[in-house]
């Protein structure tokens, strides 16, 4: 293996770790919540801070690396990522964890764009396409493997392992960088950081990603979210104006004059939305509805990651044979077919879901493999560096959009599902012939469980227990004795009355339990259908948009034009 390829593979380690940590936490959140004795709302900030800062800082920190030396700043980024991983893995409370994740994201925002530029510029121009294809495939694979790796590591090493596992790989990358990278850097004459562009881009991306990840919690029509949306739009307008009039722009707007770059940016966002939606919601469906363990949920989603692993590197090398338009069209078609099948299948039949996972994974792999190559196109110098940073940011926006859209829709659907279950249970109980007390108790149990737990636990509502039956016998006996003034009656008389009361209560309880059994069966069937609807409906709504993605392929060149 030559020196250049060693550098490319070393850069792939950094890229893999940075993007892995965007999704590796999701499946471990329930375990982490218990381990840190915190609320899910507080814990979600450990997840969100990484996405928000990574998206906000990638472009300006990538530009800083260009000016002050990529190799030196790369080691700084690796060091921050290492410290952040250790801090997160050793966190004693949620505040400590959030701070560690913040350091991780700061390191990732340095490592990611620098990795792309160092890797690409380490190879000869004629081999650049292969290097970009490897680095691009690494990005897609890392994001896809996050839930699988997170589930497996959590099962065997606990939730702290999902952060501590980074440590040996970061140290390996650090050692390899010391041996392989060039440390001579001559700062370009007259080069300086676009301060206004940096400030405006960070403001715009911070406001946008924060609004996307917190919209469901804070309310999409709340003052905070509307304020963030307005801030992001105003900052975007100001950013575009500033970049059009500054000598050394943070993001050269000339990038978007290249149709293939524009198409790559759009497809990166859309494909990311559809892939992340699968990788985030389906493990939750397996654990929260089907009752699977985190490890089993991770294994069940593995076909998606496997397809990405196979097709990402393969598709990058098909560009010259098929041309960009046909390759991107094929991947988009596979994703659309996957969502089409997902909209009509029975989610309880795992083999049907496997078809979806294969199609979406294959489609995403086909798209994401060459997209980094197409984004770079024939760009050189500053445009090449900027293109990789911008595409990386668009990838993060796609992830944030997926979480915002699908998790928000799921949360809304779960509320609706609980309402439907409650109303249906009320109607069912009202139609049954059992005692008023039994009806009241059954409804109270269902209502409590709907408020305090996942809807899936509501179906476990039990009938009148033996202990409660004894209490009912005692209460009814005491009432009869008092009513008939038998306090001083002979023991034999009292015993006879007790037996009569016991027989009557037992018969009533047996009848009520038969009726409650009907309620439980009804609730179980209703809960199953409502939860399936809650998880599957967002996918069904997204299905037409998946087909619209096919139109984006017109941005890309035919084979004859691409090779000209």
Image (cartoon, rainbow, N blue to C red):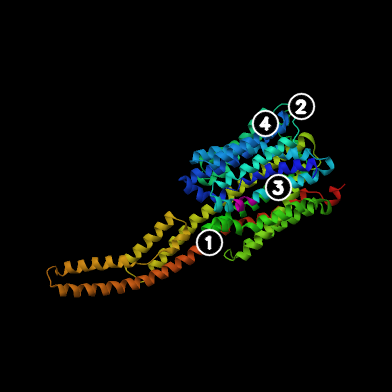
Left or right, 31 with reference to 237: left
Q: Position of residue 426 (x, y in %)?
A: 40, 63
Disc 2 designates what residue? 186
Is residue 136 depicted above or below 340 in this figure?
A: above
State how far apart marks 1 and 2 are (Cα). Answer: 59 Å
Nearer the viewer's eye, disc 4 or disc 3?
3
Residue furthest to the right:
564
Q: Which residues are magenta?
A: 145-149
Residue at 57% of width from left, 40% of height from top? Answer: 86
State how far apart marks 1 and 3 are (Cα). Answer: 31 Å
Please name the predominant secondary structure of the magenta segment in the image.
Answer: helix
Closer to us: 187 or 52: 187
Question: For residue 138, which numbered disc appears in the image?
Answer: 3
Disc 1 designates what residue? 290
State how far apart marks 4 and 3 are (Cα). Answer: 29 Å
Disc 4 designates what residue? 197
Mark 2, secondary structure of its residue = loop
């Amino acid at each position: 293996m030559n020196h250049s390829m060693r550098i490319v593979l070393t850069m792939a380690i950094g890229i893999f770790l940075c993007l892995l940590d965007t999704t590796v936490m999701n499946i471990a959140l329930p375990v982490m919540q218990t381990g840190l004795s915190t609320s899910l709302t507080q814990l979600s900030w450990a997840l969100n801070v990484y996405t928000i800062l990574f998206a906000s800082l990638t472009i300006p920190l990538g530009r800083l690396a260009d000016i002050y030396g990529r190799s030196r700043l790369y080691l700084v980024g690796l060091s921050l990522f290492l410290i952040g991983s250790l801090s997160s893995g050793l966190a004693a409370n949620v505040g400590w964890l959030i701070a560690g994740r913040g350091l991780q994201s700061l390191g990732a925002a340095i490592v990611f764009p620098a990795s792309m530029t160092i890797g690409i510029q380490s190879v000869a121009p004629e081999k650049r396409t292969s290097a970009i294809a490897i680095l691009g495939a690494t990005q897609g694979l890392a994001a896809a493997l996050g839930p699988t790796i997170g589930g497996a590591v959590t099962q065997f090493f606990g939730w702290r392992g999902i952060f501590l596992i980074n440590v040996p790989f970061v140290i390996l990358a650090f050692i390899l960088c010391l041996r392989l990278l060039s440390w001579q850097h001559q700062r370009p004459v007259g080069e300086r950081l676009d301060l206004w562009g940096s400030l405006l881009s960070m403001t715009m991306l911070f406001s946008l990603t924060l609004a996307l990840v917190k919209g469901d919690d804070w309310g999409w029509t709340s003052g905070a979210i509307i304020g963030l949306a307005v801030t992001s739009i105003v900052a975007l307008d100001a950013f575009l104006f500033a970049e059009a009039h500054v000598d050394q722009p943070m993001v050269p707007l000339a990038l978007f004059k290249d149709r293939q770059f524009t198409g790559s940016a759009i497809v990166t966002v859309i494909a990311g939305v559809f892939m992340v939606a699968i990788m985030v919601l389906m493990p939750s469906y397996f654990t929260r509805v089907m009752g699977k363990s985190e490890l089993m949920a991770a294994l069940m989603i593995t076909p998606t990651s496997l397809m990405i692993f196979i097709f990402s590197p393969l598709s990058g090398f098909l560009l010259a044979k098929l041309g960009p338009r046909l390759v991107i069209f094929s991947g988009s078609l596979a994703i659309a077919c996957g969502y089409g099948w997902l909209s009509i299948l029975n989610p309880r039949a795992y083999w049907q879901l496997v078809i979806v996972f294969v199609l979406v994974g294959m489609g995403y792999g086909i798209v994401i493999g060459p997209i980094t190559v197409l984004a770079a196109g024939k760009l050189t110098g500053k445009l090449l560096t900027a293109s990789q940073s911008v595409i990386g940011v668009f990838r993060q926006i796609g992830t944030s959009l997926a979480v915002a859209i699908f998790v928000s829709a799921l949360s809304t659907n779960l509320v609706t599902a609980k309402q439907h279950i409650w109303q249906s249970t009320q109607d069912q109980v009202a139609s049954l012939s059992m005692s008023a007390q039994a009806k009241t108790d059954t409804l109270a149990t269902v209502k409590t469980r709907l408020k305090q737990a996942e809807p899936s636990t509501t179906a476990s509502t039990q009938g009148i227990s033996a202990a409660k039956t004894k209490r009912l016998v005692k209460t009814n006996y005491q009432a009869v004795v008092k009513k008939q003034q038998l306090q001083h009656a002979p023991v034999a008389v009292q015993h006879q009355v007790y037996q009569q009361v016991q027989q009557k209560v037992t018969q009533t309880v047996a009848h009520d339990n038969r009726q409650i059994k009907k309620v439980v069966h009804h609730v179980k069937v209703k809960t199953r259908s409502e939860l399936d609807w809650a998880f599957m409906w967002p996918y069904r709504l997204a299905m037409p948009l998946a087909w619209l993605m096919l139109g984006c392929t017109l941005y890309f060149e035919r084979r004859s034009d691409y090779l000209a």
